[in-house]
Image (tube, helix red, strand yellow):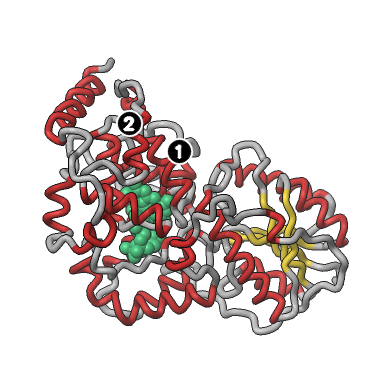
Amino acid sequence: MSAPSVVWFRDDLRLADNPALRAAMDRGAPVIALFVLDEESPGVRPLGGASKWWLHHSLASLGERLRERGARLVLRRGPAEHVVTEVVAETGAGAVYWNRRYGRAHRDIDSALKSALREQGLTVESFAASLLHEPWTVTTGSGTHYSVFTPFWRACLALPAPRSPLPEPRELDGADVTVRSDDLDAWSLLPTRPDWAGGLRETWEPGEPAARRQLRHFLTHDLPDYDRARDEPAAGVTSQLSPRLRWGELSPYTVWAEATEVDGSARFLSELGWREFAWHTLYHFPDLATENLRTEFDAFPWPGLDPQQLDAWQHGETGVPLVDAGMRELWHTGFMHNRVRMVTASFLIKNLLIDWRLGEDWFWDTLVDADEASNPFNWQWVAGSGADAAPYFRVFNPELQAKKFDADGVYVARWAADAPTEPIVDLKATRAAALAAYDEVKRAP
Ligand code: FAD
């Protein structure tokens, strides 16, 4: 029983409510904490720039917290299947624990490893920790998965309530083995030439302790105004917990448990439901980032790409104030308010007639909360090609959206005061062109 246990950290960079870590402690043997930077396994999507920045700092924080409790975080790089097997061999580990992932490439790696290590006689266990409900447990009466949110969420709410979060360990029995670890700095996750991360540093403090403070602040100060002002980008009442959930600095079980204690949190909790829905959709449609979920959209006649227009959108130079404000907020902070994400995405797809995948790619690179389910799911939702999507013909009018949700112009003034004022396209004419293109989808055999 003294053969150490490996806890393989992935999208769960936390000590609290970490069932894999808990299982290792319960086994009683010394613990080796491992993180593998895998950019090589087939099908694994390389991280975007903003994600790498976050990962660096969150790993630094996790490493320090583990050290304070008596364990060391081992950092290794390479194809995960190979690296984990290697670490097991080097350390003579007797067990490996991890929390589950739901994208296809990750599931393939995990299940191959599980069988191979079990064949060698190791104990290998995986746990539910990143979603409130496992994707295979939420099914319709006829056993299929949901494609519309409202019944999906109703079904989730009818299931047994999510379990209580596990406490954070105070002490860990770190394994006394010499095992090579990379130096975090040598991974070069931070941008250097140029260092574009100044705005990210101003905005965020990655790591579990800051995540917990942010949750508490939100529940005490902002949740009371959430229902009223959640759609107003200048109000600052949404939780901004998405990167915390993306990197697992907070578990959804912790957020759930604490938010359900507060009166009037149902709307906020249903937003966690959208996160679940996106992940369940990815589980059932692994090609969500590249293929239209509704295949009739394959007939959409995307015109040839105008790279200048894409560039203007990316850099907040479209001359449409709310769009430019959003794209500049994104570039500066690695974040954008949900309402503005919808408006900027709609503008790219339906006014510039640029394929949603190019927008999804830009968000993937620039968002600190980019994840392989929520990002393509929401892009397809806006495009009209996704699950429970907005009908294609509903084109957001960025001017009306600004009037409604940024009535005093505070958000636009904050981010786009010096943006161009002449729109690069005519909103009315491009909207009509988008609707005409959509007619072709409808007419396609
Ligand atoms: P809150 O309003 O406080 O909501 C609480 C939590 O619920 C969020 O932190 C998030 O985890 C979850 N959530 C809320 N809305 C959604 C949603 N529509 N889909 C999935 N989860 C949701 N969210 C991401 O986490 N990663 C992405 O890569 C991402 N890409 C997006 C791309 C587009 C085009 C659009 C329109 C939306 C995208 N979203 C994405 C969803 C949403 O915009 C963000 O989750 C939200 O703005 C985060 O802010 P918040 O934490 O203050 O949200």
**133 on left or right of 169:** left
**194 on left or right of 278:** right
Which quarter of the figure has residue 267?
Answer: bottom left
Residue for point 33% across, 82% down: 220
Q: What percent of the width, then of the height, locates residue 294?
A: 34, 31
Please state which of residues 39 and 265 is positioned toward the viewer in this rendering.
39
Please state which of residues 197 and 326 is positioned toward the viewer in this rendering.
197
The answer to whether one can see residue 326 in this image is: yes
Q: What percent of the width, then of the height, locates residue 54?
A: 54, 60
Which quarter of the figure has residue 239?
Answer: bottom left
Residue for point 65% across, 54% down: 188
Give the farthest residue toward the top.
445
The answer to whether one can see residue 138 in this image is: no
Residue at numbered disc 2 = 354
Residue kind at label 2, given as amino acid type: Ile
Q: What percent of the width, then of the height, locates residue 31?
A: 76, 71
Residue 297 higher or lower than 143, as above or below: above
Q: What percent of the width, then of the height, locates residue 34?
A: 72, 62
**81 on left or right of 134:** right
Please state which of residues 436 and 410 is positioned toward the viewer in this rendering.
410
Which mark is on residue 289?
1
Residue for point 41% across, 59% down: 333
